[in-house]
Amino acid sequence: MTTTVRLLILGTGSMGATHARAFAAMDGVEIVAAVDPTVDALAAFAQEFGVPQTFTTLDEAITWGGFDAAANVTPDAVHYPTTLALIQAGKHVLCEKPLATNYANALEMTEAAEAQGLVNMVNLTFRATAAAIRARSLVQEGAIGALRHFDAAYLQSWLVGNQWGDWRTEERWLWRLSRAHGSHGVVGDIGVHIIDLATFVTDRDIARVQSATATFPKVDGDRIGEYGLDANDSFTLAVGIKGGAMGVIHATRWASGHVNDVKLDLYGDRGGLRLRSTGRESSLELCAGEDVHTQIWRKVECPQQPSHYQRFVEAIRAGGGGSPSFRDATKVQKVLDICLEAGDFGSSVVTID
């Protein structure tokens, strides 16, 4: 018999709606409440998704208590206090990325959730793709031999094109452009995804990092209203992973011709893998065996995989587990902190414990 999971959505913006649509499509999941301080947005969200209970503060929702789990879709800086409050209330949490804005907070959240025995997951989108999961299994099986080198990139172009709207006139983009608005730039926004994907598929943690960011001029005065446009636009990492391989991880918002594209190329001593993903569609190719002599890449079939939303619910019903976990995201956060601290001047090599 399927146990109904009673879910609260914390944050009713565009990503909150994405979470709601995913959970509403699942059997045995009931969205019982939503929280948002903006009354009009909260009311519209509740009407669209048929949510019976609404609250303008999380404290009110926790006092009510009629939910088992929460999807935390608040701004980055709010993840830490709200997730800790949910954990202290004994609620399972699926948190949007990044888990926190620094390693210390992420580790505290991780240890709190683990101590309570709660399901804790982070919505690191790309590692849920069929291609990423199949690529990881091929690496683990030794299909390309011992890993030697990899190249990982996350490419967007919305600072050049208008496919997502006009960042010069729409305030909703400021959280990605201004540190005063809470932004950690491309590092905090999409760097978390590409670092996580690289470590997930290679099945290795990062051991050494050398990093640099870049923040380019955008408009006269580099301000929109009261906010300076000072959050980084591009970053590069030169990394060494446990086991000895080296790689490059980079991301930018200036990549014309790319809407929201991820690529990961892995090279071992017996072959290579080539992964491409948009977050909605993904593909995987393999060059191994005799094909290494003729440079032929062959398509790899990748079985359909459950989404993170489905994994979250399945873990709750199973009484534990769930991946990617808070601990997975905390490892990524340590790398993000190093990159942010290095800034536009770059860093010397940093060794990670």
Image (cartoon, rainbow, N blue to C red):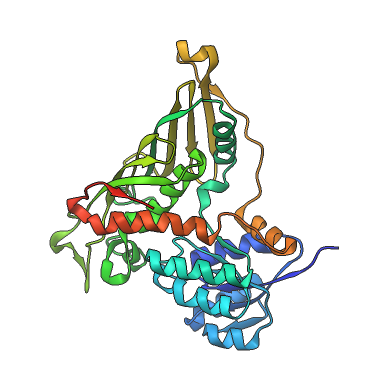
Hey, which quadrant is residue 284 in on the image? top right
Q: Position of residue 189 (x, y in %)?
A: 38, 57
Position of residue 286 in the picture relative to residue 311 (left or right)? left
Horizontal arrangement in the rendering, residue 250 relative to residue 107 (left or right): left
Front residue (pair 171, 176) = 176
* 305 or 253, nearer to the observer: 305
Q: Quadrant of residue 88?
A: bottom right
User: Would residue 241 be found to the left or right of residue 324 on screen?
Assistant: left
Percent coordinates x, y for residue 69 in the rendering:
64, 71
Q: Is residue 166 visible?
A: no
Q: Residue furthest left?
A: 221
Where is residue 295? Give x, y as percent.
45, 15
Residue beneath the point at 51% across and 59% down: 327
Above or below residue 196? Residue 112 is below
Q: Nearest the camera: 163 or 100?
A: 100
Query: 346 above or below 219?
Result: above
Name the residue rendered at 40%, 58% in the picture. Answer: 333
Residue 127 percent location from the top left of the image: 53, 47
Residue 67, placed above or below residue 249: below
Q: Looking at the picture, tell me which residue is in the foreground, 169 or 180.
A: 180
For residue 320, side relative to residue 241 (left or right): right
